[in-house]
Amino acid sequence: MKTKQEILDIDDIKLLVDSFYAKVRADALLSPVFNERISDNWPQHMEKMYKFWQTVLLKEHTYYGSPFTPHAILQVDHTHFEKWMDLFVGTIDELFIGEKAQEAKFRAEKMAEMFEYKIKYYQSYPSRVIL
């Protein structure tokens, strides 16, 4: 069994993102949603996720953009967000310890809550897009 480590650099971010998305791509609930949206652009998506989490956790500003916008039209509900969080938290707990690991879980939870709320709003009021 591999020893858990702190999230310290971009290699740790890549390990987190690669491990998490391997689980997403194998998951019966999440895989269809991600594959439909991302299609054959997985390498570009992974690069974007590396930059996003590098910016959030390491404070190295490599990600620019609005994280919510690509998610606005997804047909997902609470079950999808629960599964996403289970896989994300599980991945962190398998691989990492420390302050940055806790911060990643906290940030992911808050982001999932916000995305779920905004998507639900958009589904209820499609003419009132909030980005």
Image: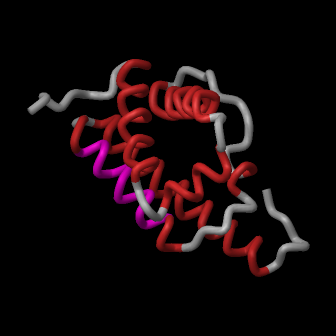
Q: In the visual, does 42 lie left or right of 22?
A: right
Q: In the visual, does 15 lie left or right of 42?
A: left
Q: Predominant secondary structure in magenta? A: helix
Image-quadrant location for residue 91: top left
38, above or below 6, in the image: below
Colour convention of the picture: secondary structure
Residue visible at 49% across and 64% down in the picture: 81
44, above or below 84, in the image: above
Q: Is residue 82 magenta?
A: yes
Residue visible at 65% across and 34% down in the picture: 41
Q: Residue farthest to the right?
A: 127
| Image spot of residue 128 (x, y percent) | 87, 71
Image-quadrant location for residue 1: top left
Residue visible at 59% across and 49% down in the picture: 35
Tally of marks = 0
Q: Is residue 90 magenta?
A: yes
Residue visible at 41% across and 63% down in the picture: 83
- The span shown in magenta is 81-93
| Image spot of residue 107 (x, y percent) | 47, 48
Q: In the visual, does 83 lie left or right of 76?
A: left
